[in-house]
Amino acid sequence: MAIRTTVTPARPRAVDGSLSRLLEAFGRVPVAAVIRRGEELPRAVVFFLRAPAFHLGPLVWAVQARGKLAFVHIDLIAGLGKDRAGIAFLAREIGVNGIITSHSGLVAAARAEKVIAVQRLLLYDDLALPSALSALDHARPDIVEVLPGVIFPLVVNEIRSRLPLPIIVGGFVTEPAHRDAALQRGALAISTSTTELWP
């Protein structure tokens, strides 16, 4: 009887939290694959959403073992504090390349831990845009992720006039036409859970 063993990927010794490497990666492949659980790992930058905290280490390390960057959405991870201690755990113990958050207050904590800070800009109506841009201007994340992505062409000029930051577009980016429209309007990359758009 054969015994099946599973080898847990080891954490890389030095984690690259440099923005330049991320920009270079998106220059080659402008897609961040959004992983909600433990789906087949793609050949792209990976954003982990909703994975349990105790599963994160092996998932992140498997992505990094392939030479890719792994980001964790701290707001959505079950079993992890949504605070400075949670970010410190992700940076020091897991070794993530960056965090994703909707909360301006966590951006400074991510930068203090020397990981890339991606702040989500959730646009639910046109009245939310000015206050959201003010919060981003104060927090100064490394990258902004605009959601839902399908409205990006409508708001890109206003965002660009206020924030000279790289922009990722996510949420409802499910068709090649959505991806192409965002990239043509100046998005650095898209984030999507639609596996057909993964490289």
Image (cartoon, helix red, strand yellow):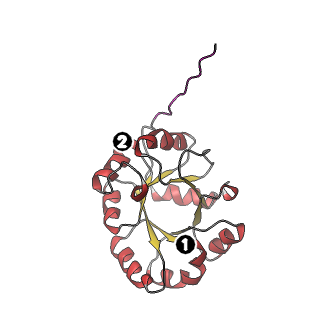
SS category of the residue bearing label 1: loop
> As shown in the figure, which amino acid type bears the numbered disc 2?
Glu
Q: Nearer the viewer, mark 1 or mark 2?
A: 1
Please name whichever residue, 11 or 193, is drawn nearer the observer in this view of the structure.
193
Please name whichever residue, 68 or 103, is drawn nearer the observer in this view of the structure.
103
Q: Indicate yes or no whether the magenta region holds residue 107.
A: no
The image shows a total of numbered marks equal to 2
The residue shown at (43%, 57%) is: 76
Quadrant for the C terminus in the image: bottom right
Quadrant for the N terminus in the image: top right
Identify whether 16 is placed above or below 106. Answer: above
Image location of residue 193, percent across then percent down: 60, 58
The residue shown at (56%, 23%) is: 5
SS category of the residue bearing label 2: helix
Q: Residue furthest top?
A: 1
Q: Which mark is residue 93?
A: 2
Identify whether 40 is placed above or below 135. Answer: above
In this picture, which residue range is highlighted in magenta? Answer: 2-10
Whole-number angstrom distance, CA of label 1 to CA of label 2: 32 Å
Which of marks 2 and 1 precedes in the sequence? 2
Magenta span dominant secondary structure = loop
Q: Which mark is residue 169?
A: none
Q: Determine crowd level at label 2: few under 14, some 14-19, many 20+ residues with C-alpha closer than 10 A.
A: few
Identify whether 146 is placed above or below 110. Answer: below
Image location of residue 145, percent across then percent down: 49, 68
Q: Determine crowd level at label 1: few under 14, some 14-19, many 20+ residues with C-alpha closer than 10 A.
A: some
Q: Which mark is residue 148?
A: 1
Q: Are marks 1 and 2 in contact (CB under 8 Å)?
A: no
> As shown in the figure, which amino acid type bears the numbered disc 1?
Pro
